[in-house]
């Protein structure tokens, strides 16, 4: 694994939009101001405000912003500020060799989770599943979400030689999954993110590798029947059989549409018949407050005691 150098006040960081367009330019301005409030120097990607249909610029433009950010020695970190759709079109246009030679703090979530995992798998760089600065709900981010995010930005969540518990929001307790195996402990690197995005990578060179890893899943705006289809596609591909454990994050706005009967999410998950430790209702995804955490870093989860610790 390659850990990025923690950011320091005065560092220049790039803000890029590798997925959907940012329809309201004031959100880019807000993201820039937030970065400045941290004592960092924001550098807006050249194509950050562009639009190409449902994308924030052409594939070449979006890939250019990402590749240039890693190639520029003055840039010390890269913040993806918008999710949506479109990252899958960039995965074969990224200069992974340059990223490996110039490792930097890289963060985002949702559609960006495809990048978080592809970059880690291709280069070994630990990436960070964090809020997106130009998403509408970031302006409403609570104190926990911001402080937890900023600890990773500045490397304050470094574990040293000790286990570091993943701090949860006040009054938040992880739920116990009733069918956990006899051994509730799982240890392995964290992988995963948005189910809708990661499911489309099956059969590609960037397919998610869950072997021996703790597999995190969150999703937004999908009907239960679609979630069922994606999860069982993952099951048939061995993603649950070969992982060390599974963490289910928030399933945001994933309700039946009422047109015909549908299983609920807990039943769908139960019928996966998972044989690895499971934690349910982890407060991470398209919600507030939300946990930030590293993709690629080794973690220890205890499904019985409902704890997650970074190693």
Image: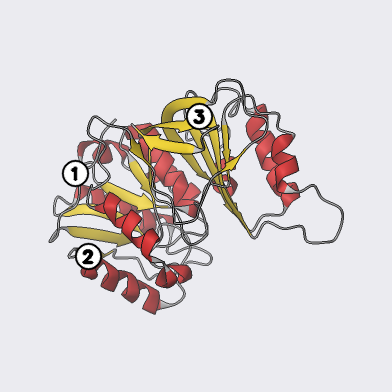
The alpha-carbon separation of the residues under discs 3 and 1 comes to 26 Å
Q: Nearer the viewer, residue 1 or 92?
A: 1
Q: Nearer the viewer, mark 3 or mark 2?
A: 2
Element marked by disc 2: loop
Q: Nearer the viewer, mark 2 or mark 1?
A: 2
On screen, residue 281 above or below 210: below
Residue 208 % position (x, y): 50, 34
Label 1 Cα crowd, 10 Å radius (few <14 / some 14-19 / many 20+): some
Residue 172 % position (x, y): 50, 53
Q: Which residue is mark 1?
A: 5
Element marked by disc 3: loop
Q: Which residue is mark 2?
A: 38
Which quadrant of the structure image shows residue 253?
bottom right
Residue 306 % position (x, y): 51, 38
Q: Residue at x 82, y 50 (%)?
A: 262
Element marked by disc 1: loop
Would residue 68 be seen by someone viewing this image from the given angle? no
Q: Residue at x 73, y 41 (%)?
A: 268
Q: Which residue is mark 3?
A: 210
């Amino acid at each position: 694994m390659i850990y990025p150098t923690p950011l320091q006040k005065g560092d220049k960081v790039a803000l890029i939009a590798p997925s959907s367009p940012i329809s309201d330019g004031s959100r880019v301005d807000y993201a820039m101001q937030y970065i400045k409030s941290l004592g960092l120097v924001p550098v807006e990607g050249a194509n950050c405000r562009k639009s190409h249909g449902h994308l924030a610029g052409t594939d070449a433009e979006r890939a250019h912003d990402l590749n240039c950010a890693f190639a520029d020695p003055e840039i010390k970190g890269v913040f993806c500020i918008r999710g949506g759709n479109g990252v899958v079109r960039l995965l074969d246009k990224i200069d992974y060799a340059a990223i490996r030679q110039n490792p930097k703090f890289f963060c985002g979530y949702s559609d960006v989770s495809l990048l978080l995992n592809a970059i880690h798998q291709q280069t070994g760089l630990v990436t960070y599943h964090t809020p997106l600065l130009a998403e509408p709900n970031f302006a409403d981010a609570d104190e926990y979400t911001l402080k937890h995010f900023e600890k990773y930005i500045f490397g304050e969540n470094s574990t040293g030689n000790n286990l570091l518990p993943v701090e949860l929001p006040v009054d938040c307790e992880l739920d116990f999954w009733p069918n956990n195996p006899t051994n509730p402990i799982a240890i392995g690197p964290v992988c995963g993110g948005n189910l809708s995005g990661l499911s489309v990578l099956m059969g590609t060179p960037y397919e998610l590798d869950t072997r021996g890893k703790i597999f995190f899943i969150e999703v937004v705006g999908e009907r239960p029947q679609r979630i069922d289809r994606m999860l069982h596609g993952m099951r048939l591909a061995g993603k649950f059989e070969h992982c060390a454990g599974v963490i289910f994050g928030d399933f945001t706005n994933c309700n039946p549409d009422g047109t015909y009967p549908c299983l609920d999410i807990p039943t769908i998950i139960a019928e996966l018949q998972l044989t690895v430790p499971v934690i349910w209702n982890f407060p991470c995804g398209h919600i507030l407050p939300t946990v930030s955490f590293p993709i690629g870093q080794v973690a220890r989860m205890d499904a019985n005691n409902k704890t997650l610790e970074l190693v």
